[in-house]
Image (spheres, helix red, strand yellow):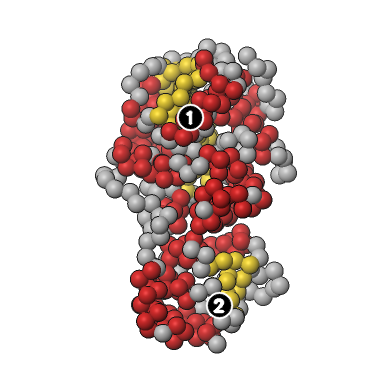
Amino acid sequence: MIADTLGAALDRDPPVAVRLWDGSLLPGRDEGSDLPTVVVRSPRALAALVREPSQLGLARAWASGLVDVEGDLEEALRRGFLAFRDEPWRPSWPQRLRLVTVVARAVGVGALLADLTSAGRHSLEARLRGRRRSLGRDRAAVRHHYDVSNDFYRLILGPTMVYSCAYFEHDDEPLESAQERKLDLVCRKLALAPGERFLDIGCGWGSLVVHAASRYGARALGITLSEPQAELARERAREAGVADRCEILVADYRELRRGEFDKVASIGMYEHVGRERLGEYVRRVRDLLRPGGLFLNHGIARLRPIDPGPDTFIRRYVFPDGDLHPLGYLVRELEQADFELVDVESLREHYPLTLRCWRANLEREFATATTLVGEERARIWRLYLAASAVGFECGEITVFQTLAARRGADHGLPRFRRRWLAGSVPASV
């Protein structure tokens, strides 16, 4: 049976059961009826792993439907993550040769060569050109992720169209109310007041700028690099009756040259900035703020200062050129740019709940999703949402809201801040 030969070639028991295309089974290292099973549907999946012996090879096989999971996908990913967390598995050259032998015996040398040829870069992997962190390349990276389909994002995110973690009062709270609470939390932390000039960097589909204008009376500017996002954000502002107080521009934060803002927020955007541009990003925000103005940065961070490298599933398929780093890097740049750090809050426990809501939306409407973006992209999102939930739950990554004030004037925040966490939303202005 091929499973016996494959097990000998790998020299270790997998963390989950593996069933091969001939029906043979490679049992997992743990027993139990609820053990997820990875289904390898074709020798081409092993060819992808031989050609790129990393999570990227597995991702290519997954996206193409050559590999699937029976049972709990999150549990399968969790077991794999914990098994290889401190010692990532990368087959040695002798192991790769043994894998080649397994496939060659199964399908023949000619078919193996054909499989190895076809197991290269997948059509949905990002193909970025130009200097890293240049304006042109950053636009291409952002549009790779966001210029897919507004209807697809609405299907996953729900009616609030908020693409960052919600703020849950309890585990089974509806996603929409938890997202509304998060938007309100941002505005409360910024002490947003009627008539204040508010900038949202990376405004997405306009949820925060509309909330800030309609609930707090702010004069809001949102910027995004995605034209489809901007079009829908403008439409939503009109529908909410606040188009006169909301402006949406297709622009990079580096291109803003006008205006002095009272408050600035950046929600789920600075992951695209990059470590090498972090100081420039913070200084640009400072220059756009009045003295005493407040800046809230909501972003994902690593809890360990270990960069997994460019050839990961997330960086190739989901967030090209995305960059996560420990919170300390941001804090250092804030302090060097003449900001006073006022408050830091971790929202890590809220993100798995959010991601599971998004994935439940996707699974419930998977047929519609495949119609909108194709089956392969829908499968990529299925894996991305499940893997991200595992990453946050296992403490590999986290998300922080960091509030800072530009020096030079009193920031005006109260010493006693219970209202930040109040559940009620102020009446519409």
Give the quadrant of the N terminus. bottom right
Q: Is residue 272 visible?
A: yes
Residue drawn 50% across the image and 86% down it: 5
* Residue farthest along the front direction in this orientation: 371
Q: Decide: is 125 above or below 148.
A: below
Give the quadrant of the C terminus. top right
Residue drawn 65% across the image and 62% down it: 72
* Front disc: 2 or 1: 1
Q: Position of residue 32 (x, y in %)?
A: 69, 73
Pick whichever, 51 or 265, lies toward us.
51
Image quadrant in which you'd find residue 249:
top left
- Taking the image as shown, residue 49 lies to the left or right of residue 176, namely left
Q: Position of residue 55 (x, y in %)?
A: 45, 63
Q: Amino acid at mark 2?
A: Leu
* Residue farthest along the left direction in this orientation: 131
Q: Is residue 86 visible?
A: no
Element class at badge 2: loop
Q: Position of residue 20 (x, y in %)?
A: 55, 77
Q: Decide: is 42 above or below 147.
A: below
Q: Decide: is 267 above or below 427.
A: below
Q: Can you identify the residue that label 2 sits on? A: 20
Image quadrant in which you'd find residue 182:
top right
Q: Position of residue 356 (x, y in %)?
A: 63, 49
Residue drawn 58% across the image and 70% down it: 38
* First along the sequence among labels 2 and 1: 2
Q: Can you identify the residue that label 1 sits on? A: 231
Element class at badge 1: helix
Q: Residues within 10 Å of mark 1 (few under 14, many from 20)?
A: some
